[in-house]
Amino acid sequence: GIHAVIELRRSFSRQELERAVEGAIAAFPVLGRSYEPRFWRDRWRKVDGPVSEAVHVVDNPGDLEAETAWWARRPIDSISERPLRIVSLRRSEGSRLILSLTHLAVDGGGAAAVGHVLGAHLYGTKPSLPVDARRNVGSALEALRWHHVPVLVRDVAAALLQPLRTYAAAKRERPFPADASREASWRHMRVGAADIERIKKRCREKGASVNDALLAALARVAANRSSSGPLAVMYTMDLRRYAGSARLTAANTSSILTAIVPRRAIGDLASTAGAVATITSRQRRSLAGPAFLLAPLALAMGAPHAFARRFTRMLTPLIVDLPLRRGLIFTNVGRIDDGLAAFGADIESIRVIGPNIAGVDVPAVVAFGFRGELHLELFGAPGLAIEALDELESELRDALELAPARRIEAVSSPRETRRH
């Protein structure tokens, strides 16, 4: 699950929220369907229950943070429920909206598209971009032509060999603290506009972006947790850049790429970001992103989906566990101001919780920009101690060369919560 938590100066009635959900389902039919695994081909099956099942209004939430954590930890059953849920928690002045989506249905870009359409329906405006209900690989890669095929074949082969390069990266020698907890935890950090401008200025001189700076910061963190060898940092690339035209899609069209940063390139933030920029620009110029999406399709082409699911589970130690024993994983959603434009000045603040993960012994980092500030969410899976987030927050603060805590606002989740 991916959860957006939005503080609003106003509240909406149940009827308004249900109409917005109906509008979102009309725009993106997948939001009205549940996932049905089958032997030959899985499918999205229409849910017959009323839309009201996906809308919850809590008039007296009591402990607002505990109630928020309860909903964020409550999974959506993809097999029987719609992949969309809206929860409205009333406040003395306004409300808190929790928009939850399953990662099976959408990635970060898809969640942003759904939020944009929901906001448009709540405020009676039109989406700023055309809405596209398609979810297939062809529509995601429409801008590619036949002359790209040789490069694509080359990069698919490189994607299949990527685990070997990752295996050669430095293995984490100092693990993050673990405990016996069965609940996820999270921490939110906000980096102010002045700090962001300072980082931009220093990194621009090295030809690096803020995204490169964040990858560089994680590489610096990984270097401090190992003693030798190159550093691996995994990051997501939104493949909507290959769609040919700007449009809103509720799909899962992101790839996970790995930047292997030589240890000799680890220095201060700006110089490390410059080295990272060389790697990421090379990956953007290639077709590494589409190749990551197409490589598993090539391996399982024509196979029954039941076989593909089993095959994927067999590959998990190689494509998930191996890189996570070496590096960190990072997702940058980008600036979300345009996506939330319909809400206007009603928005007081926004946070992201998730995506919910399990069986991972390293915190995940999600970044987004809003109103000139950088927001970082650190997400710890069940089994990771709260101290893991403490350590990563401190290490990120050092790696980003930020001033003491007065420049960063951190918000933690309660570890143990019970709904009243």
Image (spheres, rainbow, N blue to C red):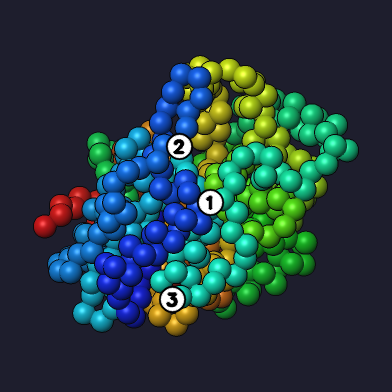
Residue that badge 3 annotates = 123
Q: Residue furthest front?
A: 48
In the figure, is residue 50 to the left or right of 365? Answer: left
Q: For the residue marked with disc 2, what is the amino acid?
A: Trp
Q: Secondary structure at mark 1?
A: loop
Residue that badge 2 annotates = 44
Q: Earlier in the sequence, mark 2 or mark 1?
A: 2
* Residue 217 placement (x, y as % from top left): 58, 54
Q: Is residue 108 visible?
A: no
Gap between marks 2 and 1 measured at Cα: 13 Å
In the figure, is residue 76 to the left or right of 224? Answer: left
Q: Is residue 40 visible?
A: yes
Q: Earlier in the sequence, mark 3 or mark 1?
A: 3
For this rendering, which residue is in front, 165 or 161?
161
Determine which quarter of the picture holds residue 352: bottom left
Gap between marks 3 and 2 measured at Cα: 29 Å
